[in-house]
Image (spheres, helix red, strand yellow):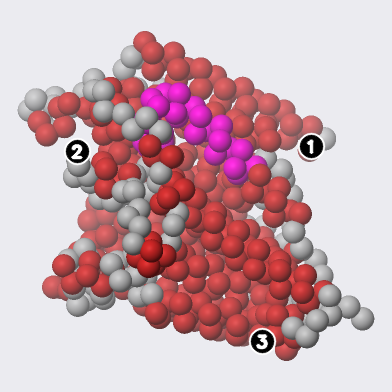
Amino acid sequence: MLKDRQSKFVAILLGVLLFGTAYGMVSFYHQVPASMSEMIFTLAAFLATGFLFLRKSFYSSALAAVFSTTLFAATLIITEFAKMDFSTENPDVVFYEPLKSQALHALLIFVCLFLALLLWRAPSGWSWGESTPPEKTFAKATRGFFLVAALALAAVNVQGELITQAGYHSTEWLAKQRETYSGIDALWTMLGICSLIGTLRVYGARHKNFYVTLGILLAALFYFKLLRGERSTTFGFLIFLALLYYTISTSRFRGWIILALIPVAFVFLIAWANVRGTASEKGLWQSFSEGSSSTLQDIQEGSIAKLDRFPKVTWDLLETTFLYENGIHREGATYWNLIPQMTPSFVAEIIGYERPLSEPWILARYFQHGGGIFMVAEAYWNFGLAGVIGLAIILAWVCVGTEKLYRKLPPVLSYGYYGTVMIGAETVLVGVQSFLRGLEIGLLVTTMGWVLLRISQRGTPVSFAKMALGHEPKE
């Protein structure tokens, strides 16, 4: 009976999302003014996201949550713009007036189509994996090997100066940041996840070793990330912890607990934008106190346009819509350049190869913006609405393929899945190049673990590899 009800619920959601896609297309071509009616489809998007989460399609639901929230923010912002008299209130953005509804409808089409495809094709029932716990010596190596590797990479690849010493994106901060590699930065957080899950698989969530490992990782994130102005990795790690808690917890209220913590994390990360800009002058505590108060005041006043990140991606979409409609197209260059851009920077330096500029740098030629560029904005800038529809189809295919891939792997490699969730959720807001790098690193770490696992199964003398993977030897 329950399964029948779920099937009916999914069918209804699919119908609403497909209708939302059709509504968006009609509104786009007939230039229907933006209104709060888009909220109906935003609500359906949030319901579909929640259903994907309950089905334990975590990777799909994490990306869906980001896109649904972006649609919600864009709807509020752009309908707020619709009430403005641009000639008197905000003359700097007057050129957005004829395009604001067009941009919103393009985003509506993307989110509804993307979620409809996920509901239709995404697998369900991801299992944490049941197995006999290995000996504790294996757990020590699991925690030790991956944790030491993560901390070592973090220490040699420190991004930027401390924000208490130099302002975020100041000359000193940028000089230090140029000496680092973003790929290594994502790799060490993935290895940290390996150590945490390895410890959890053996000792459980109530053992002190789990809390020690978790504490070390959080301290590393605070020092190597937050104190250097970087928030996105911390945001991704919090998503990972929430999914991990939901997976292993037996509490009936675990979903509600996660929902209650979301606004707390949201306010914290937005307030940190103020901290990283003023901490060198006012100190951490005063900067955070002022940032939190300002963020809460903006929320109370309903001034979502003043908040951070989600409004930023709305501006990305408005800007690229403006460029495309005025004949400035990328014509696929964003995607053709992905392969040469994936060349590691240190390799490019050695061979003297100059990689193509990424999209944020290209967009900066026309508009001043905060770095990164929304994936949907990139798609529109290249191929217009056809690019947006194509991105929805391809991204849904990637999500479904990723879900199915990790379900075929041994449970000991589940850290690759959770790490990919973490990196994927944070990179969809900053461009397809960063998104692919996240997939690349997740598959790299998983492949490394798979190779070591296969070696250990053949009985060759790789005892450290066995312990690092937490693999129980055959009797």
Q: In the rendered picture of this protein, how many numbered marks are placed on residues?
A: 3
Sequence-wise first label, 3 or 2 = 3
Residue that appears at 40% across and 80% down: 155
| Range of magenta residues | 375-400
Quarter of the image for the N terminus: give it. Answer: top right
Q: Is residue 189 above or below residue 139?
A: above
Q: Amino acid at mark 3?
A: Lys
Q: Is residue 391 magenta?
A: yes
Q: Is residue 303 above or below residue 370?
A: above
Quarter of the image for the C terminus: give it. Answer: bottom right
In front: 88, or 178? Answer: 178
Residue to which mark 1 is pinned: 3
Q: Secondary structure at mark 3?
A: helix
Q: Residues within 10 Å of mark 1 (few under 14, many from 20)?
A: few
Q: Position of residue 130 (x, y in %)?
A: 80, 66
Question: How many angstroms separate mark 3 from mark 2 (CA)?
Answer: 53 Å
Q: Position of residue 187 (x, y in %)?
A: 50, 67
**Within the image, what quadrant is residue 164 found in?**
bottom left
Residue that appears at 15% across and 27% down: 94
Residue to which mark 2 is pinned: 366
Question: How many angstroms separate mark 1 from mark 3 (CA)?
Answer: 42 Å
Q: Of the numbered discs in the image, which one, if any, rests on residue 140? A: 3
Query: Would residue 311 be seen by someone viewing this image from the given angle?
Result: no
